[in-house]
Amino acid sequence: MSINLAFGITMQLKYLLALILMLSFFKVSAGTVEDQIKIRQSAYSLMGWNTTKIKSQIIDHPETYNKDQVIAATEVIFAIANSGLLDLYGAGTHQGTGWKSTRLKLDYFQKQEEVKEIDARLVKASIELKASANLGDLAVIKEQFGKLGAACKSCHDLIRIRD
Amino acid sequence: MSINLAFGITMQLKYLLALILMLSFFKVSAGTVEDQIKIRQSAYSLMGWNTTKIKSQIIDHPETYNKDQVIAATEVIFAIANSGLLDLYGAGTHQGTGWKSTRLKLDYFQKQEEVKEIDARLVKASIELKASANLGDLAVIKEQFGKLGAACKSCHDLIRIRD
């Protein structure tokens, strides 16, 4: 009996420790509501800077095309898309101010299946865009860049408040 | 004479066009002073999020170590370090507000040799950190992570106003 009791307490302690660890990890990796909003706004701003560079060199001014710069820009987009962005959308983060007020709709939390489908599409598009940049064929890069833009737009249409 | 004159005008036009292109590209890639500050603040915020994840899994809570997550975090840091951050430090950007007031010292523009040396060290450290994350040896990752932190600190000490 006393052995069973001790074993029971040990197991409960283990679960408790696991829970504390999980919570402390969540706090570290995702942060406060304000931090989550701030970091996702930073992520999309940086994606924007890099998509602007690609658009400029591939579409608007192809005569300025610089293969290494386009590869570097696609690596940023891929790395951000693949970094666990959805961890930055914790409960309650449809309201609040990071660098500025969030535009996240409450719908985000009710449309998780569509969100995850779009997220997977974004990651896939970013991988293919990076591969096309390494090949260096402007027509192919442009096509893949279009697919990335489509994934971005799907998400904006679904869960972002219009300006 | 008329051929030489025509040739002269053609060459001048070419230089003029090249200059316009260069300026328009600069405008697109770097943006206004406010945009440059905003994007570099975004870049460092995102680096901070990812270094926090690595620190948590490698140093503070190694029992939560997840190889794929650490690799993904190092890819963000590498991609950002390698994305031409120095383009975001145009003339006049030691004053102004992006997401918040910049902390860049005027010294940045007078200490270009040291800045470039540190920038090269940051890129190198980020490449080696990514490589160590792929190997998956925590002691090696920790060592490389320390080198990355040292490069960050060198730059803060040189050109960032203390809080």
Image (cartoon, coloured by chain):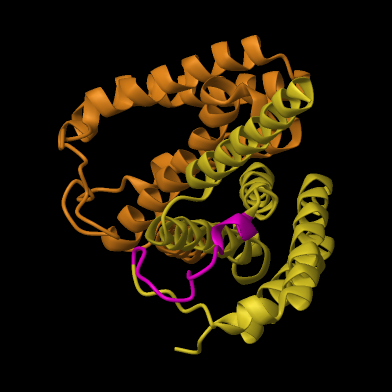
Chain colours: A yellow, B orange
Q: Position of residue B153 (x, y in %)?
A: 33, 23
Instruction: Judge by depth and name the residue closer to the eye, A119 or A108.
Output: A108
Please give left or right for residue B42 compared with residue B140 in the image: left
The picture places residue B58, in percent across and down from the top left corner, at 59, 23
Q: Is residue B39 visible?
A: yes
Picture quadrant where residue B72 is located: top right
In the image as oriented, which residue stretches furthest toward the front? Answer: A1
- B82 lies above or below B46: above
Which residue is more in the foreground, A54 or B22? A54
**Left or right: B114 as drawn, with respect to B51:** left
* Magenta segment includes A95: yes
- Which residue is rendered at x = 49% and y = 46% of the image? A27
Task: Residue at 70%, 21% (x, y): give it.
Answer: B131
Give the residue at x 48% y 40%: B47
Q: Quadrant of the C terminus of chain B?
A: top left
Residue at 40 percent of width and 40 percent of height: B86
Instruction: Name the residue nearer the viewer: A131 or B10.
Output: A131
Q: Position of residue B100 (x, y in %)?
A: 24, 57
Q: Is residue B82 magenta?
A: no
Q: Which residues are magenta?
A: A85-99
Vertical placement of residue B66 versus B153, above or below: below
